[in-house]
Image (cartoon, rainbow, N blue to C red):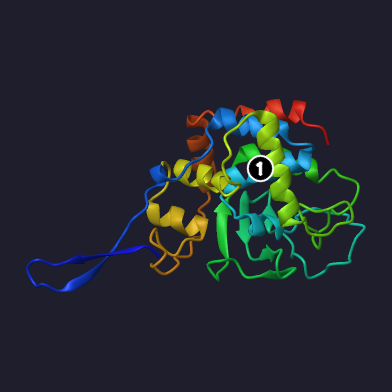
């Protein structure tokens, strides 16, 4: 928490003044850069992971902890890894219930400590649906993003792949967390700031306000999709579907 001490001239008392960080202070990719990053991914899952980070605002560990609505799994090795419908394609929402900790090699509660819901933009449904067509690990007990044997992706390996994709695409060396800011800076155009804070799992813009739980309304996903279209992001999906190998 960043705090600056300022003296109240009238009362000569020391008061804490929170330093508010606005979205403009966060460096992020624009639509063209996001498209280039997704195209530079080595496979469809990696590409979809980058798009999901940018279009849902989930943290890396939260993405790696997401479980299916996927069906007909051949794997039940990790029944506690994820419960059904963390990603609900039909309902157009993502329920953030857990996060994968690479250091602990275990799942934990989200950073906010609370479950939250995020509207799922229509543009992200085709890439996610394509993942459901893989041969294995498509059941409700499986992970949306997983290794070839159905286990959690290694967060450190994923970051290395991300930086390799940046290099191939000739992009700026922004952190993977910058993808999360793509969501935040677009979402504020469609929703009140308090709703965006809830979707992102922020307690407050200064990290001091209590977490406000948000339940997306029936039209929230459509509103968010409209905001992304205004940012020239939605045309990426058909192009990426054609260019990205499974």
Position above or below: 217 against 228: below
Residue 219 visible (yes or no): no
Q: Quadrant of the C terminus?
A: top right
- Camera-side residue: 89 or 156? 156
Q: Is residue 214 left or right of residue 91?
A: left
Q: Residue at x 86, y 54 (%)?
A: 137
Q: Nearer the viewer, residue 90 or 62?
A: 62
The image quadrant of residue 142 is bottom right
Q: Is residue 82 left or right of residue 26?
A: right
Element at label 1: helix
Looking at the rendering, which quadrant does residue 244 occupy?
Answer: top right
Q: Left of 158 or right of it: where is 141?
A: right
x 75%, y 68%: residue: 105
Q: Residues within 10 Å of mark 1 (few under 14, many from 20)?
A: many
Q: Which residue is mark 1?
A: 50
The residue at the point 61 percent across, 61 percent down is 96
């Amino acid at each position: 928490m960043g705090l600056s001490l300022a003296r109240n001239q009238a009362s000569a008392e020391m008061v804490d003044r929170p330093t508010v960080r606005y979205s403009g202070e966060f460096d992020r990719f624009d639509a063209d850069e996001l498209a280039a990053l997704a195209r530079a991914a080595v496979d469809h899952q990696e590409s979809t992971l980058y798009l999901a980070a940018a279009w849902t605002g989930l943290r890396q560990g939260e993405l790696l902890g997401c479980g299916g609505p996927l069906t007909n799994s051949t794997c039940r090795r990790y029944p506690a890894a994820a419960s059904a419908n963390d990603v609900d394609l039909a309902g157009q929402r993502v329920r953030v219930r857990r996060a994968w900790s690479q250091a602990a090699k275990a799942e934990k509660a989200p950073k906010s400590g609370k479950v939250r819901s995020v509207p799922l933009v229509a543009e992200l449904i085709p890439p996610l649906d394509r993942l459901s067509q893989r041969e294995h690990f498509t059941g409700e007990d499986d992970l949306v993003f997983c290794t070839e044997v159905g286990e959690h992706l290694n967060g450190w390996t994923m970051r290395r792949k991300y930086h390799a994709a940046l290099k191939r695409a000739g992009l700026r060396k922004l952190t993977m967390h910058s993808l999360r800011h793509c969501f935040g800076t677009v979402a504020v155009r469609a929703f009140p700031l308090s709703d965006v804070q809830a979707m992102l799992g922020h307690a407050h813009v200064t990290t001091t306000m209590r977490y406000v739980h948000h339940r997306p309304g029936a039209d929230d996903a459509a509103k968010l999709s409209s905001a992304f279209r205004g940012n020239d992001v939605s045309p990426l999906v058909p192009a990426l579907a054609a260019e990205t190998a499974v």
